[in-house]
Image (cartoon, coloured by chain):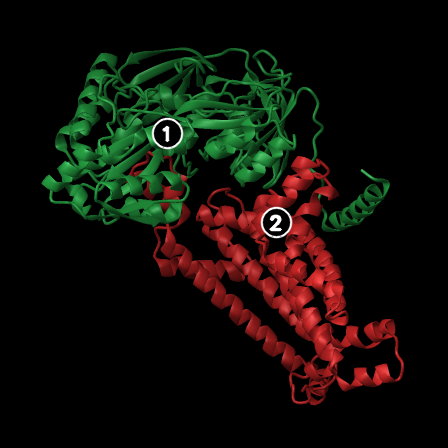
Amino acid sequence: MTALAAGSRRPRSFPASPRYLAGRLAQAVLALFGVTTIVFFALRLSGDPARLLVPEGASAADIERVRDQLGLSDSLWHQYLSFLGNAVRGDLGYSYVQNRPATELIAERLPYTANLAVAALILSVVFGVTIGMVTALKRGRWQEKVLMPIVLIGQAMPAFWTGLLLVLVFSVALRWLPSTGYDGPLSLLLPSVTLASLSAAAIARVTRGAVLEQLSQDYIRTARAKGAGTTRLVFRHLARNSAIPVLTVAALELANLLGGAVVTEVIFAWPGIGQLTIQSVSARDFPVVQAIVVFASAVYIVVNLLTDLLYGVLDRRVAGGTKAGAA
Amino acid sequence: MHRRTRAALALLAALLTLGSAACGIEPASADRGPDTITIDTANYPSTLDPGKQYDTDTYSVYRNIFDQLLRRDPRTNRVVPWLATSWRQTDPLTWRFAIRPGVRFSDGSPLTAADAAFSISRILDKKYGSQQYANFSVIDSAAADGSDLVVRTSVPSPTLLSYLTTLSVVPQAYVRRVGDKQFAVKPVGSGPYRLASATAGSQIVLTANPRWWGTAPSIRTAVFRAVPNVASRVADLQSRKVDLATSLTPDAADQIRRDPKLAILSTPTERVAYLAFNTIKGGATDDPRVRKAISQAIDYDALIRNLQRGYAKPINSMATPLAFGYDRSLPDNQHDPEAAKRLLRQANAVGATLVMATSPSFDPQVVQAIQGDLAAVGLNVEIRNSDQATYLKKVQDPGHDWGSIRFGKWSCSCLDSDGVIYPLFHTGEIWSSYTNPEFDTLVEQARETTDVARRTTLYRQSFDLLGRDLPGIGLFQSYAVYGANSRLQWTPDASESLFLDRMKVS
């Protein structure tokens, strides 16, 4: 209790104040609840899973039988309340198609998506930050003229196109890398490059913007006047001061990637959350879709929360939740 | 590769290995010896319990782990003995099957008539919740009598044998001991293969079952991989990652044909591409003259030649020539736009707008081509595309408010006209937006008659009626199209099954 009280009296300190944390957590739970509710009802408005499960010649009675079995003939409110009740206890239901707990299905796919997401994030931060820095520092020079179009192409090319292009070159023509599936670390290369091409471009643009803004600040001019070299300038001043916007984008990209890089996973037959999402939505496998939504929203919320907390490390003015001194 | 490239790749591989190990995922590679085959299918099997699901990609895998009660001869499509060595009808409702002696499940326990009876009974059990129930609901009871399986139906059933070719026999004692959930993950069957490993969502490896009663299959190991994207399946074939890829589209087949080391294997199936009309609340299509005009407006030949690239065959009705009851003597579909225009003028329907319901899982190019054909004779077609679940919800509604025309593809996996025209056009069936008491009586009688000659006559009359009334148009018979490495020797069959014991690699 003392810690709590002390914390709230010292808003500008890090770690963030408990009140700030509690508020953020309450927001998070509310968001999770809202998203799940919307998905629950939207799913049930859209189509009947029982019809997809029966053979083509099945009669209305056969479908009714399956609906009973799945608990879909109960009233919508009854279904919703029992879903909420179970969800609170950590039970997100059984897959209609596979007859297994939805959480188990997600847990099984998570390592694949996490692996891909982390690989893609590393690639995109390394390439994105480098390209962003270089294009900002070498403004108007040939480096910028070469790199900027690449960034634009990277952001404009849809994943299914990049992915198939990479497969055609490296798997079909050169036979260097596996085309689909997971047969060891080399098969991680093409899908993670595909994913990274999108987020690296976003990170590059944000980095460039942030660095350009810093470059116009007085302290840089002062540092330059005092004779600081480029290396010192980049690592001592620019990196730290441009980090917040870059971190924000990177964190959101990670949340995106973890939530399911749907298209990329489908092209590369990567058995992650993204592929599971596609399968479950088209089969109207309600419990699995709901569980994925809960999971993806939770990832977003947690990543956002962690990002905000990390701001505190980089810029202590944010930690108390008051941004008065920030500008 | 240059030394530097190789070094860079090695470094990258090392990094990524660390990453993979940290996430706890294992490479799912399998060596590819001369007796190993790798197959790309569109979906990962939803279960390995053969009593539950029914979709093609699930079927393809589990039917190799289990033996079916009966099979079809891949050349003639006739029902032939498999686990049942012979059968006879003792009365119109009772069938007696002799079960093959000496068959053992892969865990060593013997397969008996009681296991066969159990396999049927569990599908009929409401608590079990099988999605195949509709196929077996005519069965009243299944029981063992010594080494015989005795099946009683509620009405005489001419299609019973057809559906029993899809019945896989499971071990009663094992299923009871481990429970349904565990059984679906660790299945034990008597079939030519057994489960070696499964990587959820990704791939399943089967190996030859040394206890199998038949001639040992030449393929020892089979890897089924789930690759949902058709372009990726083609790339897998081209990069020699797989030997066989299923569910290819006609344009993907064109790509494969250019590679001398690859082959296209295709076969006509019992799947029929069709239009069905709303004859109850369809607006313009309530008038039989408009339906007739539409049938004359369509350029069938162009659909087959240009869009299906020849992987389809013309048909004269709603069934394919593979189905029992198909009548070869009926007139073929005629493309005659002038006649169509005349009929539309008579019906006062020139310029009418028709809503066409479809789903992207059916060939969108065919839908657009038909839209063009109908525009050419003066009908406006508004295409309403919705995903499969929404499409079904819309068209299977007793209110019949889904529009005027729908496009679909149909297969009953039973090779019988009953499985096609009964559900599509019998009054009150969920798919049917047509009603005709005369037709209803004909198909009801045909469904409960085991007399072949009488059934043939009844279907001849039913198809005559459908030809006159036109509640639907059979557009063409679809092909199953597979891409294969030329080292694979295999002839695909009409039921779209992937029996590994019928394949060889050289």
Residue B110 in view (yes/no): no
Chain B appears in which tint? green
Most extreme residue toward the right is A227
Measured as percent of width and height from the top left, residue A292 is found at: 54, 55
**Would you identify the image quadrant in which residue B261 lies?**
top right
Q: Would you call the spot at circle 2 few (<14 residues within 10 Å), some (14-19), or many (20 or more)? A: many
Drawn side of residue B441 relative to residue A140, left or right: left
Q: Residue at x 29, y 21 (%)?
A: B157
Give, as a three-letter code, the residue at label 2. Thr
Q: Residue B218 in the image: x percent, y percent?
A: 62, 15
The kind of secondary structure element at disc 2 is helix
Judge left or right: residue B123 versus residue A182: left
Q: Nearest the camera: B435 or B115?
A: B435
Quadrant location of residue A205?
A: bottom right
Which chain does the residue under circle 2 lie in? A
Picture coordinates of residue B238, whole percent (x, y): 62, 32
**Label 1, label 2: how many angstroms apart (C-alpha)?**
33 Å
Give residue B112's position: percent from left, percent from top. 49, 17
Q: Chain of mark 1?
A: B
Residue for point 64% across, 64% down: A202
- Chain letter for the red part: A
Callout 1 secondary element:
helix
- Tag count: 2
Q: Are marks 1 and 2 in contact (CB under 8 Å)?
A: no
Q: Can residue B253 be seen at all in this image of the molecule?
A: yes
**Residue corresponding to mark 2:** A162
Residue underneath mark 1: B304
- Of the 4 image quadrants, the one containing the C terminus of chain B is top right
Q: Residues within 10 Å of mark 1 (few under 14, many from 20)?
A: many
